[in-house]
Image: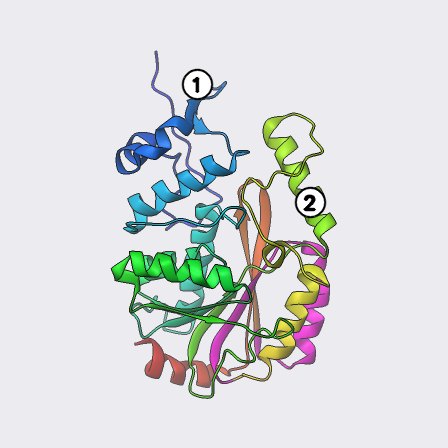
Amino acid sequence: MAPKTIKEKTNLHPRNQHRLRYDFKILIENCPELQPFVSINEYDIETIDFSKPEAVKTLNNALLITYYGIESWDIPENYLCPPIPGRADYIHYIADLLATSNNGIIPKGDSVQGLDIGVGANCIYPIIGNTSYGWSFVGTDIDEKAIENCEKIIEANPKLIDSISLQQQTESRFIFKNIITPEDKFAFSICNPPFHSSQEEATKSSTRKVNNLEKTKTTKPVLNFGGQNAELWCDGGELGFITQMIYESAKYPLQCLWFTTLVSKQSHLSSIYKTLNKVNVVEVKTIDMAQGQKNSRIIAWTFLSELQQKEWKFEQLD
């Protein structure tokens, strides 16, 4: 019998460690708790049931142990459990973006500080960014329980203690206000904004996803990747959140080299570009990326001229 060909996930970033199919043998060696969730599918391939929240969380734990040196990681029930390959892609594209302001060289080390808007309870972006490039992070969230869980993750993993700090956003109508101080210099901000404009819309989307995964029909909402209200929906949905973020970013033009956000819905791009034009950004970049079965993109903008970017480079990114 001919050996199975392991297909590379060419839609993922070239530096993404998860371009090949999951090696469940290694993952189970590092995280034995994963074993009960692994089975052989109809194509004779090892996999897990991605419609089951506990299976997804345990896979994430195994990936973090195996590839990111995390000793202990957990999230509270019903909190967002993000697919790690897609989150890693965002970080690697940010590295490429920073290189454009650094003579083509990816800046590394803890002097490169990122701001994670909506860090959630999982702390995934700071973990991946710190492990991959040595960057330091400030993670913010409006959810006190999410911040508390991130604190537990950081305390359980000594290598993260000096690299990730957390701050709760106490006023939900603001994004950068109360967070960015006059002394701050962030190389970048990242954000995975709430996609939906209501809890009903989020529930419908989740039910549709689970039906697609299980190839069945259910009306009972099951969040296989979890998610609290603030993680999944907000008034105005994705477009409202990003619009607010852009207007607020204009108040801190010299304190962040590149502001960025994921944009799930292509139909929102036209409005986003118009808003960016209104606040007189100097440069806008659109970076296409794929997350699983769906296409997404990163929108990045800066208020700094080319000269200011070079000056920032020598001060901040060497």
Queried whether the magenta region covers residue 189, the answer comes back as no
Task: Locate residue 238 relative to residue 170 in the image: left or right.
Answer: right
Queried whether the magenta region covers residue 258, the answer comes back as yes
Q: Residue at x 34, y 34 (%)?
A: 33
The type of residue carrying mark 1 is: Asp
Residue 200 on image: x %, y %: 74, 48
* Up-down relation of residue 261 to residue 65 (above or below): below
Using a 10 Å C-alpha cutoff, classify the residue at mark 1 as few (fewer than 14 neighbours), some (14 to 19) or many (20 or more). few
Question: Which span of residues is magenta-colored?
Answer: 254-283
Residue 124 on image: x %, y %: 42, 55
Residue under numbered circle 1:
44
Q: Residue at x 34, y 11 (%)?
A: 1
User: Would you identify the image quadrant in which residue 102 lies?
Assistant: bottom left
The foreground one among 237 and 223 is: 223
Whether residue 243 is visible to the viewer of this picture, yes or no, is yes
- For residue 203, the mark is 2
